[in-house]
Amino acid sequence: MSGKQRLGLFGSVIAAIAVVALTVFALHHWTPAAWRGKPPGQQDAVHFHPQQTGPLAGTKPGNILLKHPHKPDAAEIARWQGQLASEFHRVADIYAQMAKFPTYSVPVTPQSIKQFHYNQYFPVTIPLDTPDGHVQIKVLLQQLHFQKGDPIVGVASVSGKAAATVSLDSVSILSDKNHVLYNSSLGQPDKGKDYALVVDPPAGSTSDWPSELLLRVSGSAGDHTVAAVAPFFYDDPIGTVSDVGDASIDGPNLVIPVTLDLDGDGYYAVSGDLYSTNGQPLVHLETKAQLSKFDNNTELKAHRAALQETGNAGPYVLKDLMIRKLPDKPGDRTLFGPMNPKSFPVQGFPFDHYSQQPWVDPMTKARLEFLRSAQPG
């Protein structure tokens, strides 16, 4: 989990707790003095006496009557306070678990690892009504961000009652103003009505293309035209991970040297995932550094606490390597390199070879202490 994600979660839970705390405070303090000490149902009515001017002129005092809502008794307030205390403890326990690991080295599961695949694409599904019935065209690209010079790869599929009547025959690249930049034909689908998308414009023809583009697949359903459009980004190349060195131990960390092939200078994030040799995801790794074409070496680190949490001392496999070029100034977009398809072996070491000092972050510790010590009432 990144620092922003941790901060966001912390802010959300504090906001929720604050709402409950204010409710308890309001129940306990924001009541008319005439009500305090009286049981529910026996409070005095609160009367408002408007000035005898304007549209209310001539009304008699007491004609406007507002009753204050029910004031809970001491037992009800105590119950709210108990719930708030329980929530503080629950959130503190969650945060304590998070705080055991540095943001550069986070244990993952097959489910949670997906949140760290930053360049994943979520399919676009277009429902269509044809003379023969309802169909859906789904477009799923390999990733959201492509580098210019690389083919745009994905799959288009047709499903629904009238899927057999639909035939897709072309794929186009459009600008955000719907200008056709490139067009090519589609091959035949497989038996499941899936069409392979591989759009590979000629080298040099894409240099003046905008970054934000649309991919359109089109065809026919009988005498009617059908189409589906999916957005993606097409940016200038930033580089790739080219090599991984031998791992070693440095204090509490397993250090993995990484070499990049970069197209320019900048502030980069490098990420990857450690797997067991049988394919189980174990730890997500991430680092950030100022790099250039010539200063292109950095390190990924796996903290002993994260490795030990998985119960796997290695050897490992490092996969899912990718780089991101972070914004140079406000308003710039993050640029994404492709995910390296290669796997790299990583040596493991017994856990007692590492420094046994636990991970401690002062800010995280302070937040946890606040959650542990805060009590309602």
Image (cartoon, rainbow, N blue to C red):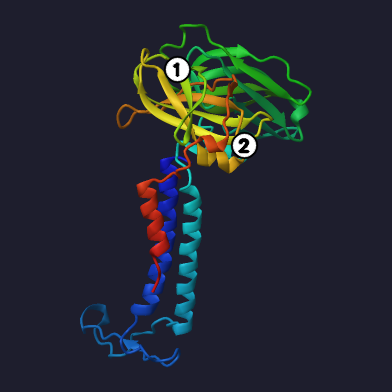
Pointer 2 residue: 312
Residue 159's spot in the image, x, y percent? Answer: 72, 32
Q: Is residue 259 left or right of residue 218?
A: left
Image point 46% across, 36% down: which residue? 252
Badge 1 density bin: few <14, some 14–19, many ≥20, Cα 10 Å: many
Which disc, if any, is residue 96?
none
- Numbered label tally: 2
Q: Is residue 222 visible?
A: no
Which disc, if any, is residue 260?
1
Q: Nearer the viewer, residue 299 or 232?
A: 299
Image point 65% across, 24% down: which residue? 155
Image point 56% across, 13% down: which residue? 183
Residue 201's spot in the image, x, y percent? Answer: 53, 10
Residue 214's spot in the image, x, y percent? Answer: 51, 24
Image point 34% across, 78% down: which residue? 29
Q: Quadrant of residue 28?
A: bottom left
- The amino acid beneath tag 1 is Leu
Q: Nearer the viewer, residue 343 or 61?
A: 343
- Compared with 331, 359 (above or below) is below
Mark sitting earlier along the chain (2/1): 1
What secondary structure is found at the residue carrying circle 2? loop
- Compared with 355, 364 (above or below) is below
Q: Is residue 195 left or right of residue 338?
A: right
Q: Quadrant of the C terminus?
A: bottom left
